[in-house]
Amino acid sequence: MVYKRIFAEVKEYKLPSFLTPVCMILEVIFETIIPLLIAKIVDVGIGTGSIKAILYYGGLMLLCAVLGLLAGIGGGVFGAKASTGLAKNLRSALFSHIQTFSFANIDKFSTSGLVTRLTTDVTNIQNAYQMMLRMFFRAPISLIVALVMAFSINARLAQVYLYAVIFLAVLIGSLMGSTSRIFMGVFQKYDDLNKSVEENVSAIRVVKSYVREEHETGKFRRAAENIYKLFLRAEKRVIFMSPIMSTTVYTCIILISWIGAKMIVSHEGLTTGELMSMLTYCMYILMSLMFMAMIFIMVIMSTAAAKRISEVLNETSTITDPENPVTEIADGSIDFDDVDFAYTADAHEAVLKDVTLHIRSGETVGIIGGTGSAKTTLVSLISRLYDTTAGDVMVGGRNVREYSLSHLHDAIAVVLQKNELFSGTILDNLRWGNPDATEEECREACRMACADDFIMRFPDGYETKIEQGGTNVSGGQKQRLCIARALLKKPKVLILDDSTSAVDTATDARIRKSMKEAIPGTTKLIIAQRIASVQDADRVIVMDGGRVSGFDTPENLLKTNAIYREVYETQTSGGGDFDVKGGDL
């Protein structure tokens, strides 16, 4: 079943996949004919002194060699095309399938694990597939044909090969059984290696600021050392095959030469040419066994990789479109009706409990609460990044489960806590919000997000290149670009998840004022740690331990809600983060 899912991605490369073994079989046939022709040259040509026979059988041998060479080249070309095509399709299928995952699905796989599957695991499948197409057919057929040819020449001598084949088959089988378990564990260690690289590169500034280069280097070295040790254990077992097989080959050659020479001298039905052919077939048979051992190793390695890839490909998204999805979102009203939520089905306690809210379309609602109070989890349910465990979430008067996911996500713009920018120009990044946005529309969104001023100070303005992850802009600049990108969507609901934490309070106030004036019909949810950021909201939700502690205007909460009052007094008593101008908008 594992390989069935993998081979389903062969698709348009079925013809090269078929032609590869055909070419390899032809190569084997032409190669195994050559020793018979050599025997004819020795016995008929040289034995009788016939130049004509030598030229005739020599010409046939040359023809077989050329045809075998062409077949081998064809097998190599078609095999490479089929295996690289499978790898391309597998990577595309994996990447496309990952895009359909809900957050719950993504939580099951680490980033480094997904990267390993897309790179190392797919490469192992590619190498194994090429080996299987070429050698999986070539080696057994070469073994069988060579044995048949050997028995057709002299059954008594051929029995030596048969015993050698049985001996080596038992040996290979026992070695492969113990080696396979080791290879299974190797790929798990690749995840640790990739995780170390990913964390170090993405957080290189933190590593350097805390002078932890030596610690990180040691962590990477340990991950690399683990892979080295596992591969070494596997290779130590596999390497025993080489001297044993070499010993078996030389033993067969000695026995064939000894027995064959005695048969020639005693005239027991064996000629010199036939003995030469038997020795040639000896190499064919034993080399075929070596190739089959290599195939087994590749299959074992690829089986571990195939299982890991299949885990992702067979993962079904926990969130899908309904049978007849609604594509029109009426307005930005939001309702929570007795909602509970837990990240896993076996969780001991729900993250959100008994949440009931009604938010009017166009309303600006602040959300505050301590760390771990489930503020981000609350807004994640609105755009259906997760499904509720109990209760319903409504947007525009309909349950979010009724909407097409693409249309729901298109109507809700989210600026997350962790802001992400992508490689490309500033305009490229802004147009993630609206691919058809004109430059003037992008500028207007940036003016609303207070980003236009700093953009125009760059030498290239809106054509400034953004490095991967936005490393060449500050945290506050990155946040404002992400807000502008969200505004370009012209959403019915705008969610700002602590997305102005890196800007000063005056800029924060200007952003909120611009949004209030420019998009009055958009429902705005603002998660914030600063009271100043929610002071001018129509209402504020106070979260505490996954429950709604209060939901009212800032003025009323100041009188009725102890949590809100404590945060307000803490931040305003000594100046804190509270900005008078920001609070009075």
Image (spheres, rainbow, N blue to C red):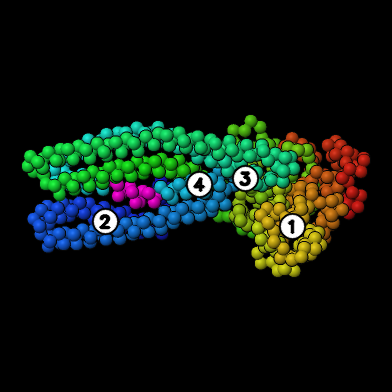
- Rounded to the nearest angstrom, the CA distance separating label 3 from label 1 is 25 Å
Between 493 and 31, the residue placed more toward the observer is 31
In primary-sequence order, the first of circles 2 and 4 is: 2
Q: Residue at x 8, y 43 (%)?
A: 269
Q: Is residue 431 magenta?
A: no
Q: Work out whether mark 1 precedes mark 2 in sequence or the reverse, and give the earlier one.
A: 2
Q: Which residue is mark 3?
A: 198
Q: State the CA–CA distance, disc 2 to disc 4.
A: 33 Å
Question: Which numbered dot is residue 481?
Answer: 1
Task: Kindly report the distance in space between the C-alpha atoms of the residues bearing marks 4 and 1.
Answer: 35 Å
Q: Nearer the viewer, mark 3 or mark 1?
A: 3
Return the residue at label 4: 120
- Amino acid type of disc 4? Thr
- Classify mark 2: residues with Cα within 10 Å, few (<14), some (14-19) or many (20+): some
Q: Earlier in the sequence, mark 3 or mark 2?
A: 2
Alpha-carbon distance for marks 3 and 4?
Answer: 15 Å
- Secondary structure under tag 2 reads helix
Give the label on residue 26, or none.
Answer: 2
Q: Which residue, as the protein is rendered here, is positioned at the far left?
A: 267
Q: Quadrant of residue 26?
A: bottom left
Residue 472 in view of the camera: yes
Q: Residues within 10 Å of mark 4 (few under 14, many from 20)?
A: some
- Residue interval drawn in magenta: 129-140
Q: CA distance from mark 3 to mark 2?
A: 47 Å
- Judging depth in this view, the residue of 128 and 163 nearest the camera is 163
